[in-house]
Image: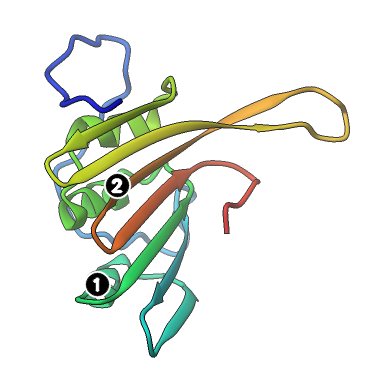
């Protein structure tokens, strides 16, 4: 089931606090995410760590599939840049940094999905963490925060 997102009241949600800006973070930035890019088509496969997000749009194109995995969601400049580059709605970006119930939302030909990943470490306790995904034709951007890596 998908829904078109309408405005909503939310006084306790964290909001993105900066204007759209450059995507680079300094090397000593404690909030700098780990970014991995996987891009492929019939003749090429690329799997690399990305230090400069402004390079990411260059990997998009006809007949390519691109997956950008973001581990670390505290860098608001990075979120704003990805939101602009992939036309991710601002409310979706807020959902990335705020724990949400599982859901799927549609914005034209783009989608936003939130899931809760369950893990059971050796201690036996059941833990969960949020994975958010923005995707459309030829791309997937995953957002998560923590020690566990999707890729």
Q: Quadrant of the C terminus?
A: bottom right
Q: Quadrant of the N terminus?
A: top left
What is the distance, in whole Å, between disc 1 and disc 2 at their CAs? 18 Å
Residue at the image point whose x is 17% and y is 13% from the top: 8
| Residue identified by numbered label 2 | 79
Q: Give 86 or 45, whichever is nearer the viewer.
A: 45
Of circles 1 and 2, which is in front? 1
Q: Position of residue 73 (x, y in %)?
A: 42, 43
Outermost residue, bottom side = 43
Which picture quadrant has residue 129? Answer: top right
Residue wearing tag 1: 60
Q: SS of the residue at dot 1?
A: loop
Q: Is residue 6 above or below residue 81?
A: above
Say if 11 sits above or below 86 in the image: above
- The residue nearer to you, when weighing 95 against 114, is 114
x and y percentages locating residue 78 in the rendered image = 31, 52
First of labels 1, 2 by sequence position: 1
Residue 105 visible at all: yes
Is there a contact, CB below 8 Å, between mark 1 and mark 2?
Answer: no
Q: Quadrant of residue 41?
A: bottom left
Is the residue marked by circle 1 packed among few (<14), some (14-19), or many (20+) residues within 10 Å? some
Tell me: residue 86, above or below residue 14. below
Q: Residue at point 12% right, 20% down?
A: 6
Placement of 101 over or under 30, stated as above or below: above
């Amino acid at each position: 089931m998908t829904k078109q997102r309408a405005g909503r009241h939310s006084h306790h949600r964290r909001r993105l606090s900066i204007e759209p800006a450059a995507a680079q973070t300094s090397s000593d930035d404690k909030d700098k995410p780990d970014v991995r890019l996987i891009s492929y088509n019939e003749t090429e496969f690329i799997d690399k760590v990305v230090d400069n997000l402004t390079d990411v749009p260059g990997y998009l194109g006809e007949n390519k599939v691109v997956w950008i995995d973001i581990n670390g969601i505290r860098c608001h400049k990075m979120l704003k840049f990805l939101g602009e580059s992939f036309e991710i709605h601002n409310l979706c970006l807020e959902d990335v940094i705020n724990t949400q119930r599982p859901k799927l939302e549609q914005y034209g030909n783009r989608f936003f999905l939130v899931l809760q990943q369950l893990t059971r470490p050796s201690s036996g306790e059941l833990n969960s963490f949020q994975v958010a995904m923005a995707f459309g034709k030829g791309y997937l951007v995953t957002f998560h925060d923590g020690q566990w890596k999707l890729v």
